[in-house]
Amino acid sequence: MAKNPSVPKMEGAEPPAPEKAVAPGTKIIPLPEPELLPDMPVNFLEVIELRASVRQYSQVPLTIKEFSYLLWCTQGVKMGLPKGASKRNVPSAGARHAFETYLFIQNVKGIKPGLYRYLAFEHALLPLKTAEEMGEAFCSCFRAQNMAKNNAVTFVWSAVPERMTYLFGSRAYRYLFLDAGHVCQNLYLAAQTVKIGVCALGAYDDDKLNEVLGLDGKDEFAIYGATVGKL
């Protein structure tokens, strides 16, 4: 029987921050509050049965409320917990939630095209680069370049391993990939309730995508992605 990987001792260790810091005074874009989003009656069995990957999208933009809804359902924070943990709308091993969400926005009403990071605790967007600054660099990272170009938003989740290894040691890397699946499935199901298409993206150039997002590929790296657009 294989031995379990060792778990690091936590006594005296400073827990890692649950979200990357934002410099004081940085302008962020608040999103519609979750409690202001409309209630939607859902036939859950229908949602499960009709869920499918959608690879072609219309040119109809997402509304900012729809976009806020998708972000809330995938990484929305319900409660902060001690030692860098949090309760969110998706499961995570040990409530560690080791992800950041990057968004290449191309067609959302009221938001300029470009690269953003979702600030889960603030439920807001942090602008990173304009679409002009990004050029073709982002879409060229993916094998399905045409799909990455012709959508409303591309989600990319990055992993910050320290948040998970703090509690689970080397076994944390298994949990990171399991958690990524939970997050993307929440995106699929949430999108299905509002007639928005999603297709998961796993085929990309890791080094190139990390570079475009400004990640070092070790302390933070892209782990999964998905395209989103109106049907």
Image: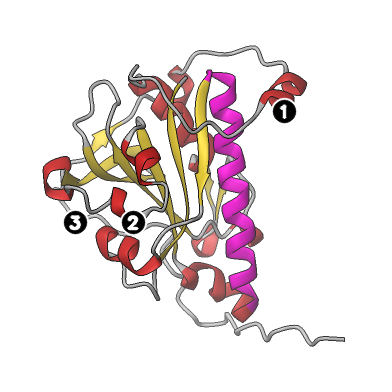
Contact flag, marks 2 and 3 (Cβ < 8 Å): no
The residue sitting at 18% across, 49% down in the picture is 134
**Marks 2/3: CA distance?**
28 Å
In the displayed structure, would residue 130 be above or below residue 181?
above
Q: Give the structural element (helix, strand or loop) at label 2.
A: helix
Q: In this image, 26 relative to 206: left or right?
A: left
The residue pinned by badge 3 equals 23
Indicate the position of residue 205 as horizontal and vertical percent values: 39, 63
Which residue, given by chain and number where applicable, does mark 1 sit on? 48
The part of the chain drawn in magenta is: 171-195
Left or right: residue 122 versus residue 183 is left
Q: Nearer the viewer, mark 1 or mark 3?
A: 1
Q: Marks 2 and 1, Cα distance to the nearest angstrom?
A: 31 Å
Q: Position of residue 208 (x, y in %)?
A: 31, 65
**Are the residues flagged by discs 1 and 3 in contact, CB closer than 8 Å?**
no
- In reply to whether residue 175 is colored magenta, the answer given is yes
Task: Determine if residue 30 is in view.
Answer: yes
Distance from disc 1 to disc 3, alpha carbons, whole Å, reads: 41 Å
Callout 3 environment at 10 Å: few (<14), some (14 to 19), or many (20+)? few
Membership of 156 in magenta stretch: no
Residue 123 can be seen, yes or no: no
2 and 1 marks in contact (CB < 8 Å): no
Q: Nearer the viewer, mark 2 or mark 3?
A: 2
